[in-house]
Amino acid sequence: MTYCKNLCVLCLVVLFLSACGTTGGKKHLSAQAAKPECKIEHQELTPAWVSGSVADAGYFYGVGSSPISFNHGRDLDKAMQQASADLSSSIKTTVSKIITSRVSDSSGLISEDNDVITRSTTETSLSKIKRVASWRDGVSCQLWVQVRVDEATVKQNLARIESEQMLKRAETLFDSTDNISLGLAARTHNIEMAVALIADVRFELLPMVKREFYQGRYDERFQALYAQAKSKETLVLINTGSEDSEALKLEIARIVTPMVKGSWHKQRKSCSSTRACLKVATNESAKRLVLVTFSREKRPGSMGSQLGSVNISIALYDVKSGKGLGKADKAKGEVLSFDDNLDWNLAVQRAFEAEPIKIALKQYGSCTVETC
């Protein structure tokens, strides 16, 4: 009887342990199934391109990765997204450098145009993306992919989009010349910039538009505005030590020409000397020359600020004799900023608030060799 009881107890213990072992085994198998299988036979060495080291010239490359799972399609999509983002960053950096190296504000394009060109070139170029390599890392359990775009494709897209943006900016400038409230100085400046932009547009990349259509309209407007300007007797020329200040030249012309009666402004590169400026005035049939010279500088201020200052001096000459008729000493305008965005136009406006400058400009519009 005791033997039978012990046997029954033993059987129950065995059954219990067996059940526990089976449950534990199922949990272990389930855990194995949830973890991706990263064991790779004949694991290759890490390719150099995984670390971004590529030797092939003529291409932009991008590299991306994704954790390996049982859904290979999803893994590949994630890795491609990362690689595309990496490639996009590379293209944007290069395109931005190209534009910055050859485009200044004297080209007629503004920073907003450069942003559009960079963004559009990058987006268009990414439509030609190709996956050229992939690698599965069994140690880190990562899928790596490498993509690339032909450099020639990017440059061709850049040239076309840059020309499209130049044409848009030229049309905006041309349309503004109808706005009489801008003043003659701004309108002549804008038509000059429009003509310069059209000259740089690569119309062969824009098959739907013709250079002749734009060139004819712009030349006609250019001649009309300059005929109006040259009917005035006093020419305003603006000299600076730096040719990256075309926007400030226009702001100075906008202030000076209304103050000097019968004056007009011609946008051009700075004269090498006073004699050279007088020669320009002679060629323009002007009787008087108002020569504005300005410089600007930026220096660190207190508490991490930046201080910008503009120095301006003005002189009046009789063009025929070359005699100086008057001179206003240097006036200074200053602005302060706690970032790098100094308002140079405001500095120019403050410089012209100086009383000697105001008095001199009012006299310069009508005085002669005898009366100045």
Image (cartoon, grey):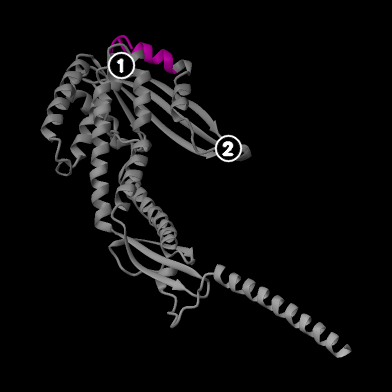
Residue at image point 48% right, 18% down:
354
**Dot 2 amino acid type:** Ser
Kind of element beneath mark 2: loop
Residue 183: numbered disc: 1
Q: State whether residue 17 is above or below residue 355.
A: below
Q: Is residue 348 above or below residue 118?
A: above
Can residue 276 be spotted in the picture?
no
Instruction: Indicate the position of residue 66 as horizontal and vertical percent values.
Output: 47, 63
**Does the magenta run of residues contain 371?**
yes
Q: Position of residue 43 (x, y in %)?
A: 45, 80
Q: Is residue 12 left or right of residue 338?
A: right
Residue in the image at 25% along x and 36% along y: 166
Q: Which residue is mark 2?
A: 305
Q: Pointers 1 and 2 in contact (CB under 8 A)?
A: no
Mark 1 secondary-structure assignment: loop
Extreme-bottom residue of the structure: 3
Magenta segment boundaries in residue numbering: 357-372
Q: Is residue 315 left or right of residue 212?
A: right
Task: Say above or below: 87 vs 194.
Answer: below
